[in-house]
Amino acid sequence: MRRLLTDKFCGGAKVSEGEVQTDYFDAQVSGLALRVSERRKSWTLHYSLGTKRKRLTFGTYPSLSLAAARTRADEIKTDIAAGIAPRSISADTLQAICDEYLRREGDKLRTVKWRRGVLDRHVYPTLGSRPIVEIRRSEIVRLLDQIEEGSGPVMATQTLAIIRKVMNWHATRSDDFLSPVVRGMARTQRSDRARERILTDDELPKIWAANYGVFGSFVRFLLLTAARRSEVSDMTWAEIDEGDWTLPAARNKTGLDLVRPLSRAAQSILEALPKTDGFVWSTNGGARPIAGFAQFKDRFDAASGTDGWTLHDLRRTARSLMSRAGVPTDHAERCLGHVIGGVRGVYDRHAYHAEKARAFEMLAGEIERIVEGGSAKVVTIRGKRSNV
């Protein structure tokens, strides 16, 4: 549809009946069009490059006014005439900024693969090609509405956290950009998302008795070490030395080396596993770490007769059992790898190796007491490991 565009018309332009989007071509600047959809109005330029007809989106209305769009369209056409092809994806689009953020900061993030997946699924299809300076708060709110309706409020909040991080990062590198994300946009509060689940004294014997190959051993080791799932799953034999497991700084959330003196029970689990040059927890000879946790967990639940718990709940359970066993709070927190804050954290440089070793033995003793007191016996893992 071709007509002389005016600010009044652009402000009131709507999608033609029966269409998903409508292009209103400007009679003043050849090739310039206002593309109107239900959610936004975008400026596009239709041009020829060689024998091919192309379309470039370069802004939204009213962030980019009609006069500014005409000027920008003329500039692009001048570049084309000079043999300079416009880029379909600007270096300042949200997707380009996200890619740059992940490239520069990815080594510092533990969940870079997951973040990239969230962006690919939920953000790029809607806002990826938009110049970051033109993205309005209302657009982000509408995006969160879509995510909440399709994937739930937690995913909407997690997606917002990624967008906020990228935009704040970009703001530190830009003279003019201000992030449109403000407090109050999240769909859930941290307190709503926090889990309080720990395994009961009735559940622990069932879990301990479930003879489910490498994953069963993996579950017991998680409980005995109070470690995070990823810390254990990516564990290599090179990290084990004379009963100590050193989690290297590169894999630790705090960015520091963490030495965990392993209890005799934890060491016995490792002794029953085949030694390789690679990963400790593996189903293919150590070449790759164990994966497919959802499938393993479903089968383990069926084998143990338990459900409703996650692998991270084992870490919370272990911490609670340490308190029950009488482990001092500071020692238990150091076993988990938590950094002690305040003045003590700055001036107390003691390694606490003996204290942590005693704490892990007390944890193992508390688990043994619960397991032996339940309906199931402690299962000692011997022989060749199963590949399930």
Image (cartoon, rainbow, N blue to C red):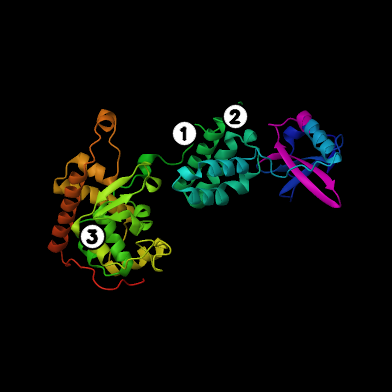
Overall secondary structure of the magenta stretch? strand
Which residue in the protein does label 3 denote?
Answer: 267
The answer to whether the residue labelled 2 contacts the one labelled 3, judged by CB atoms less than 8 Å apart, is no
Task: Assign a secondary structure to mark 1.
Answer: loop
Image quarter in which the C terminus is found: bottom left
Relative to residue 119, is residue 14 drawn left or right?
A: right
Q: Which residues are magenta?
A: 40-69
Task: Assign a secondary structure to mark 3.
Answer: helix
User: Mark 1, mark 2: which one is toward the viewer?
Assistant: 2
Give the vertical position of 134 relative to 377 (above or below): above
Residue 235 at x, y = what percent?
A: 35, 56
Residue under the point 18% across and 44% down: 355
Task: Assign a secondary structure to mark 2.
Answer: loop
Image-quadrant location for residue 32? top right
Q: Is residue 58 magenta?
A: yes
Q: Is residue 97 magenta?
A: no
The answer to whether the residue labelled 1 contacts the one labelled 3, judged by CB atoms less than 8 Å apart, is no
Badge count:
3
Which residue in the protein does label 2 denote?
Answer: 174
Image quarter in which the N terminus is found: top right
Please state which of residues 215 and 19 is positioned toward the viewer in this rendering: 215
User: Mark 1, mark 3: which one is toward the viewer?
Assistant: 3
Instruction: Identify residue type, mark 3.
Output: Gln
Instruction: Identify residue type, mark 1.
Output: Gly
